[in-house]
C-alpha cells in the first residue's frame, strides 16, 4: 500500500534485471568473439549456435520481466525503454547465432534460411512499439516477423495467426476498422482451422471481431460474435469465471445498442453476479472497477426505461464502491475519472427527478451540494485541475447558499480558499477563510469554539504568514491553539501539534529562536506520541528544530535532527520529493560549513535533482548551486565549481536581471576560480562584469569594490604587471582604511598584498613598514594563529633578507614556520613551503646543520605530495648537495646534484636551472680529479648559459673553470684562450676591479708559468695582486696567496731576495690573520726554507723547516707536506755531511709519504728512496 516503498521495490528489481542482462550480453560478446577467431569444427559451431541462442532467449525473457515491472516506458524523448533495449539485444544475439552477425538487419539462419527465434524477438518488439503507439515501427517489426514465420512454419500456423491478430488490434487502435476486420478475421479463421472452434484464443478473436462490428454499426453481427465467444468461455472456463462475465457485459452493451433492454439487463445482472462473486479481495481494484461497470450499465438501462429511482439505487451502489476504489493509494487517474462520471450521472439524475416531482428542490440540493464538493476535491487533490475544482466548489457553495446551510457554506469556502492558496492568490484565500469563519460561527449556534472554527483560524494564520505578516499570523495561530486546547483538552493532539508547529515557524521568521524551539519541541512530542516515531509530521518537526539549532550555532544538534528527519522522509516520500530536498539542502549547507564536502556534495546534488522538477524553486536551485560551487572549490574540483556557479548565474540573471548584486557575487566567485585555474582571460572578463554591476549599484568607496580590486590586483601580479597590481592594492587599502576600523583584518590583508608588491618592486623599506603594520593588526585582533598572519611574517622575513637583516629575517621566517605548523601540521604543503624558505635562509646565513634538517624534511614531504613542486624540490636538492660538499662528503653531494639535475631537465625553459646544477657537478668532479667528466659538465653548463643569457658573471665563472681544467690537463693554449676570454667577460660584466678578475689573472699566470713565459706569468700575478690590494687592502690572506704566486716566479727567475721578500710579507699577513700555528704558516715557512737552501743559507733554511714541521706535525692533516719538510731537513743534514740525521729524517719522510697514499714509483718517493740508499751507502759501506 505504501507507494514509495512499492516504487523502491520496483526500482531494486529493475536494477537486478538490468544487471543480469548486462552479464548475459557480456557472455554473448565473449562467445561471439571466440567464434570469430576460428572454430574447431562443426561440433564447436553447433555448440556456439546453441549457447548464443539460449542467451538470446534469456535476454528476451529479461525484457518481458522488465515490461511486467513497468520498465516498458521510455525515460525521455528519443530514449529507448529498458524493455526495448533487452529485445534489441536479444535480436542481435539471436541474429549472431542464427544469422550473419548483423544487428537485426537479417532474419536468416547460418545457412541463409530464416529462423523462428529471431521472429519471436521481432514479434515482442512490435508489441512494445504498439503499446507505445509507435505504429510505424510496430508495423515494420510485425512485417518482418510475419515473413520469417511464414518462411519457416508456413502460412497457416499459430505464430502467423498471433501476428495477424496483433496487427488487427493495431489497425483498430489507429481507427482503420476495415483493415482491422480483415486481419482479425484471417487470424480467427486460422485459429479455428488449427485449434478448433472451442479454443480460448478463438473466443478472444470473436470478441475483437465483435468490437469492430459494433463500432461499424453492425450490432447483430457483433452480438453473434460475443454470444459465440460466451459459449466458448462457458465451455472452457465455466459460467462463474470473470472472463465469461466480460463477454456477457459486451453482449449487454450490444443489446443496449439494439434497444433490447430486457436482454441487456439480464446480461448485466449475470455479469454483475459473477464479478461480485470473484471480487473478494479489497485490494483487487480492477475487479472492483468491473463490478462498478456492471452496476453503472444496469443503472443506465433503468434510466433508459424511465425507472429513475431504480437507476439512482444502482448509481448509488456504484458511487460507494468507486469511492472505496479511489481511496486506495494504488488507484489511478482512470479510476478517478470513472468516479467523476458516476457523480455526474447521479447529480444529473437527481436534478431531473426533482424537476419531474415539481418540488422546491430542497431535498435534491441537500444531496447534490455535497456531491459537487466531493467532485471539486477529486479535481483538486487527485487530478490537480484547480480551475475545474473551483467550478464545482462554487456550484456546491451556491447550492448551500440556497439551503442556508452555514456549516456547509463555511466548509465550501475553506475548500475554495485552499485552492486559492495553491494558486498563489493569498488575498482571495484570506477573504474566503474569513467569510468561512463568520459562517462557521453562525452555524455553531452560539458555541464559538469548535474544531472547525479553530482550523479556520489556523488557515487564516497560514495566509497571513505567507504574506509575511508574522505578527498577525501569530495572533491567529494563538487564537486557534487556545481554542483547540479547550476543545481537545490538555492532551497530545495532532491538530494542536500542527498549530504549535506553525507558531514555531512564525517565531523562527521573527528571529525568536528560543520561543520557536519551545513550540517545535512541544509539537514534536505530541506527534511522536500520537503518530509514531516514523511519521512524516515528525520529520517536519525535526527539520524545523534542526533549522533553529543551526541559527543558534549548535551544529551538532542540528546535524542530529536533520539526519533523523531525512531518514523518515526517505521512508515516506519519493526520492525526488521537494520536502526531502529541503532537508538535504539544509544538511548539505551544514556539511559544507563544517568542511565535510564528501558528505555535503551528494546531499546537495540530490536536492538539486528534486528542485529541478519544481517550477517555483528557481531561487532555491540557485542557492544549492552556489553551495555546490563552494564545496567543489574547497576540494579542488575547480571545473565542477565553475559549472555550478555558471548555472546559478544563469538562473539569477533570469530571475533578478543581469544588473543585480546577486549576479555580481556569483561572478566574483567564478572569477576567483578561473584565476585559480589559470584562465586569466576568463577571470578578467568575469571581474569586468562585476565592476560594471558595482558601478551601477555602489559608490566608488564601497567595500565590495575593495574586494574586487584585491582580486584584480592578484591577477595583475601574476601577469607581472606589478605597477598595476600595486595600484589596485593601494586603492583597496585606501577604501578599507576609510570605511573600516584601523585594526580590521581586511585592512591587514590589503597591507600584506601591498607590502608584497613593494617588495617585488625593490622598495623594501615600504614593504617592511606595511607588513609590520599588518602583523600589528593581527596581534591586536589576537589572530596571530591564522594563515594570513603567517603569510605576513613570511613576506616580512623576505623584506628583511633584502635589507640585509638576516638575523631578523630568520626570526620572522621561523615565526611563520611555527604558525604554519600549529595551523596545518608539520606534514602539510603549507608547512613544507615555508620550511624551504627558512632552510635556504639558514644556508645563506651559515647555519648549515639547521638548513640541512629543514631542507631534508622539505624533500621528504615533497615526495609524499600528489603534485610535487619540481622547482622548489630541485633547488632544495641543489642546496643539500652544496651542504654535503661543505661537509667534505662529495659523493653524497653528487647524489643530490644528480637528482636535482634530473628534475630540472624536465622543466620548461630550464637552461639556466640545468646550467647551475651542471656547474656544481663539475666542481665536485673537479675536486675528485675526474677532470674529463668535470670538463663535460662545465662545457654543457656553458652552452646552456650562453644560449639563455649570453654574457654574465656566472658565464665567466664557467669559462674560467674550463680554463683551469684545460691547464691541469696540460692543454695550455686552450686554457690560455679560455682564461683570457673569462677575464675580458668579467671586465665587461662586473668591472676590472673584481675578485674573480684577480683569481683568473693568477690562473692565467700559472699557464704562462707552465709555458716558461716568466715575464707574462709575472705580469699576470702582479695584476692579480694589484686588483686584490685595491679591493681587500694590504693585510688580507688573499694578498698572501698572490704574494706566494709572485714569489714563485721570482724563484724561477733566480731572484731569491725578491722571492724571500714576498714570502716574508705573506708570512706577516698570515700570522696577522691566522695566528702562528695555522697550516698556511707552515706552508709559507716551508717555501722560505726552499729559497734559503737555494742560496746555501742552510742555517736559516733549517730554522724555517723546523718551524714548519712543528706546525704540520701538530696539525696532522697534511702528511704529504710533513714528508716534504722532513725530506728537505734530511737534505740540509746531508749537505753538512751528517748522514745519520739525514737518514733518520728521510726514513721518517718515506713513512709519511706512504701514509699519505703515495706509491713507491711516485717521483717524490723515488727521490727519497734514492737519498736513503745514498746515505746508507755513505754510512755502512767499507772505506
Image: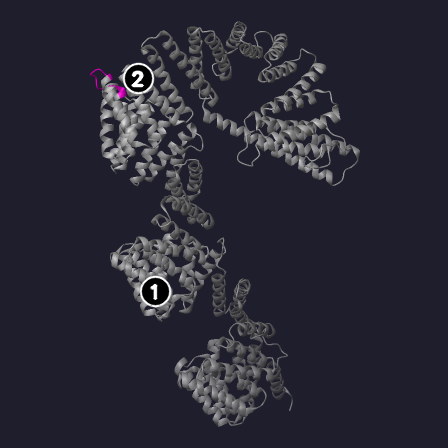
For the question of whether residue 862 can be seen, the reply is yes
Q: Residue at x 34, y 69 (%)?
A: 764
- Label of residue 856 in the image: none
> Can I make out residue 1136 in this image?
no
| Image vertical order of residue 537 relative to residue 787, above or below | above
**According to the image, label 2 marks what residue?**
400
Magenta stretch: residue 950 in it?
Answer: no
Q: Residues within 10 Å of mark 2 (few under 14, many from 20)?
A: many
- Dot 1: within a 10 Å radius of its alpha carbon, few (fewer than 14), some, or many (20 or more) residues? some
Q: Quadrant of residue 516?
A: top left
Quadrant housing residue 730:
bottom left
Q: CA distance from mark 1 to mark 2?
A: 78 Å
Residue 783 position in % (x across, y down): 30, 54
Q: Which residue is mark 1?
A: 727
The quadrant the C terminus occupies is bottom right
The reply, left or right, for residue 237 in relation to residue 536 is right
Amino acid at each position: 500500500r505504501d507507494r514509495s516503498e512499492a516504487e523502491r521495490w520496483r526500482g531494486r528489481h529493475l536494477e537486478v534485471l538490468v544487471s543480469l542482462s548486462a552479464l548475459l550480453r557480456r557472455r554473448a560478446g565473449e562467445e561471439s568473439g571466440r567464434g570469430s577467431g576460428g572454430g574447431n569444427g562443426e561440433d564447436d559451431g553447433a555448440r556456439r549456435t546453441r549457447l548464443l541462442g539460449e542467451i538470446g532467449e534469456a535476454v528476451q525473457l529479461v525484457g518481458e520481466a522488465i515490461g511486467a515491472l513497468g520498465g516498458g516506458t521510455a525515460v525521455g524523448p528519443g530514449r529507448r525503454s529498458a524493455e526495448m533495449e533487452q529485445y534489441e539485444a536479444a535480436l542481435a544475439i539471436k541474429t549472431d547465432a542464427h544469422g550473419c552477425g548483423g544487428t537485426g538487419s537479417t532474419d536468416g539462419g547460418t545457412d541463409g534460411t530464416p529462423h523462428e527465434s529471431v521472429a519471436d524477438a521481432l514479434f515482442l518488439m512490435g508489441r512494445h512499439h504498439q503499446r507505445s503507439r509507435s505504429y510505424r515501427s510496430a508495423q515494420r517489426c510485425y512485417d518482418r516477423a510475419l515473413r520469417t514465420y511464414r518462411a519457416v512454419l508456413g502460412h497457416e500456423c499459430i505464430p502467423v495467426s498471433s501476428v495477424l491478430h496483433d496487427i488487427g488490434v493495431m489497425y483498430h487502435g489507429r481507427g482503420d476498422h476495415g483493415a482491422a476486420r480483415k486481419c482479425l478475421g484471417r487470424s480467427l479463421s486460422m485459429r479455428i482451422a488449427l485449434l478448433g472452434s472451442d479454443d480460448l484464443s478463438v473466443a478472444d478473436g470473436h470478441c475483437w471481431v465483435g468490437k469492430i462490428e459494433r463500432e461499424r454499426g453492425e450490432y447483430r453481427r457483433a452480438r453473434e460474435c460475443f454470444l459465440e465467444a460466451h459459449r466458448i468461455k462457458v465451455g472452457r472456463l465455466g459460467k462463474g469465471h470473470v472472463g465469461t462475465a466480460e463477454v456477457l457485459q459486451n453482449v449487454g452493451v450490444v443489446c443496449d445498442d439494439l434497444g433490447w433492454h430486457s436482454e441487456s439487463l439480464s446480461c448485466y445482472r449475470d455479469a454483475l453476479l459473477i464479478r461480485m462473486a470473484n471480487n473478494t479481495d479489497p485490494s483487487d481494484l480492477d475487479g472492483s472497477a468491473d463490478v462498478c461497470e456492471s452496476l453503472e450499465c444496469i443503472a443506465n438501462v433503468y434510466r433508459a426505461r424511465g425507472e429513475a429511482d431504480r437507476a439512482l439505487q444502482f448509481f448509488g451502489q456504484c458511487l460507494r464502491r468507486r469511492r472505496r476504489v479511489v481511496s486506495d493509494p494504488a488507484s489511478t487517474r482512470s479510476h478517478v475519472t470513472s468516479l467523476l462520471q458516476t457523480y455526474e450521472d447521479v447529480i444529473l439524475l437527481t436534478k431531473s427527478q426533482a424537476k419531474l416531482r415539481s418540488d422546491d428542490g430542497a431535498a435534491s440540493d441537500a444531496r447534490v451540494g455535497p456531491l459537487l464538493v466531493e467532485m471539486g476535491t477529486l479535481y483538486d487533490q487527485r487530478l490537480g485541475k484547480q480551475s475545474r475544482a473551483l467550478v464545482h466548489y462554487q456550484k456546491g457553495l451556491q447550492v448551500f447558499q440556497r439551503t442556508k446551510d452555514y456549516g456547509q457554506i463555511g466548509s465550501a469556502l475553506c475548500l475554495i480558499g485552499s485552492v486559492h492558496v495553491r494558486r498563489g492568490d493569498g488575498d482571495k484565500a484570506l477573504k474566503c477563510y474569513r467569510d468561512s469563519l463568520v459562517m462557521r460561527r453562525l452555524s455553531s449556534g452560539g458555541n464559538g469554539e469548535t474544531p472547525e472554527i479553530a482550523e479556520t483560524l489556523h488557515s487564516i494564520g497560514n495566509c497571513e504568514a505567507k504574506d509575511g505578516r508574522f505578527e498577525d499570523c501569530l495572533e491567529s495561530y494563538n487564537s486557534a491553539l487556545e481554542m483547540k486546547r479547550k476543545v481537545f483538552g490538555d492532551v497530545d493532539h495532532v491538530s494542536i501539534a500542527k498549530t504549535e508547529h506553525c507558531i514555531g515557524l512564525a517565531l523562527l521568521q521573527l528571529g525568536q529562536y528560543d520561543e520557536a524551539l519551545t513550540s517545535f519541541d512541544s509539537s514534536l512530542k505530541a506527534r511522536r506520541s500520537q503518530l509514531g516515531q516514523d511519521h512524516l509530521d515528525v520529520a517536519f518537526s525535526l527539520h524545523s528544530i534542526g533549522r533553529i539549532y543551526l541559527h543558534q550555532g549548535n551544529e551538532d544538534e542540528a546535524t542530529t535532527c536533520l539526519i533523523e528527519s531525512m531518514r523518515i522522509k526517505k521512508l515516506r516520500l519519493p526520492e525526488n520529493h521537494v520536502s526531502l530536498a529541503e532537508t538535504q539542502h539544509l544538511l548539505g549547507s551544514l556539511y559544507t560549513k563544517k568542511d565535510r564536502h564528501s558528505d555535503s556534495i551528494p546531499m546537495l546534488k540530490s536536492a538539486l535533482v528534486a528542485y529541478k522538477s519544481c517550477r517555483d524553486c528557481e531561487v532555491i536551485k540557485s542557492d544549492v548551486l552556489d553551495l555546490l560551487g563552494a564545496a567543489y572549490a574547497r576540494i579542488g574540483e575547480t571545473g565542477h565549481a565553475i559549472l555550478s556557479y555558471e548555472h546559478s548565474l544563469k538562473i539569477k540573471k533570469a530571475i533578478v536581471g543581469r544588473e543585480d548584486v546577486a549576479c555580481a557575487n556569483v561572478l566574483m566567485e567564478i572569477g576567483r576560480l578561473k584565476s585559480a585555474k589559470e584562465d586569466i582571460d576568463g577571470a578578467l572578463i568575469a571581474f569586468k562584469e562585476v565592476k560594471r554591476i558595482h558601478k551601477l549599484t555602489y559608490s566608488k568607496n564601497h567595500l565590495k569594490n575593495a574586494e574586487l580590486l584585491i582580486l584584480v590586483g592578484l591577477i595583475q601580479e601574476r601577469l607581472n604587471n606589478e605597477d598595476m597590481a600595486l595600484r589596485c592594492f593601494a586603492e583597496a587599502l585606501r577604501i578599507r582604511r576609510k570605511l573600516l576600523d584601523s585594526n580590521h583584518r581586511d585592512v591587514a590583508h590589503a597591507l600584506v598584498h601591498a607590502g608584497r608588491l613593494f617588495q617585488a618592486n625593490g622598495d623594501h623599506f615600504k614593504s617592511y613598514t606595511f607588513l609590520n603594520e599588518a602583523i600589528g593588526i593581527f596581534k591586536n585582533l589576537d589572530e596571530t594563529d591564522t594563515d594570513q598572519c603567517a603569510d605576513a611574517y613570511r613576506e616580512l622575513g623576505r623584506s628583511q633578507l633584502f635589507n640585509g637583516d638576516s638575523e631578523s629575517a630568520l626570526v620572522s621566517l621561523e615565526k611563520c614556520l611555527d604558525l604554519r605548523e600549529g595551523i596545518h601540521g608539520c606534514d602539510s604543503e603549507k608547512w613544507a613551503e615555508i620550511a624551504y624558505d627558512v632552510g635556504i635562509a639558514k644556508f645563506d646565513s651559515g647555519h648549515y646543520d639547521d638548513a640541512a634538517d629543514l631542507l631534508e624534511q622539505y624533500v621528504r614531504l615533497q615526495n609524499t605530495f600528489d603534485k610535487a613542486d619540481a622547482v622548489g624540490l630541485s633547488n632544495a636538492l641543489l642546496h643539500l648537495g652544496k651542504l654535503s660538499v661543505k661537509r667534505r662528503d662529495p659523493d653524497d653531494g653528487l647524489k643530490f646534484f644528480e637528482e636535482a639535475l634530473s628534475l630540472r631537465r624536465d622543466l620548461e625553459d630550464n637552461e639556466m636551472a640545468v646550467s647551475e646544477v651542471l656547474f656544481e657537478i663539475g666542481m665536485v668532479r673537479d675536486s675528485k680529479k675526474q677532470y674529463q667528466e668535470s670538463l663535460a659538465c662545465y662545457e654543457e653548463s656553458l652552452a646552456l648559459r650562453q644560449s639563455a643569457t649570453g654574457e654574465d658573471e656566472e658565464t665567466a665563472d664557467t669559462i674560467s673553470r674550463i680554463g683551469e681544467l684545460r691547464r691541469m690537463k696540460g692543454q695550455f693554449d686552450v686554457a690560455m684562450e679560455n682564461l683570457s676570454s673569462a677575464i675580458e667577460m668579467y671586465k665587461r660584466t662586473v668591472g676590472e676591479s673584481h675578485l674573480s678578475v684577480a683569481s683568473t689573472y693568477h690562473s692565467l699566470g700559472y699557464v704562462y708559468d707552465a709555458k716558461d713565459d716568466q715575464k707574462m706569468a709575472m705580469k699576470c700575478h702582479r695584476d692579480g695582486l694589484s686588483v686584490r690590494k685595491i679591493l681587500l687592502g694590504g693585510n688580507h690572506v688573499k694578498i698572501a696567496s698572490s704574494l706566494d704566486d709572485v714569489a714563485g716566479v721570482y724563484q724561477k727567475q733566480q731572484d731569491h731576495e725578491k722571492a724571500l721578500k714576498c714570502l716574508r710579507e705573506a708570512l706577516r699577513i698570515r700570522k696577522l690573520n691566522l695566528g702562528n700555528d695555522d697550516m698556511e704558516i707552515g706552508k709559507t715557512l716551508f717555501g722560505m726554507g726552499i729559497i734559503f737552501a737555494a742560496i746555501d743559507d742552510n742555517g736559516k733554511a733549517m730554522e724555517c723547516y723546523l718551524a714548519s714541521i712543528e706546525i704540520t706535525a701538530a696539525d696532522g692533516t697534511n702528511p704529504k707536506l710533513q714528508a716534504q719538510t722532513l725530506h728537505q731537513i734530511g737534505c740540509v743534514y746531508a749537505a753538512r755531511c751528517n748522514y745519520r740525521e739525514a737518514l733518520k729524517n728521510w726514513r721518517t719522510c718515506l713513512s709519511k709519504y706512504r701514509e699519505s697514499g703515495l706509491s713507491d714509483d711516485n717521483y717524490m718517493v723515488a727521490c727519497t728512496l734514492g737519498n736513503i740508499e745514498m746515505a746508507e751507502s755513505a754510512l755502512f759501506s767499507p772505506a
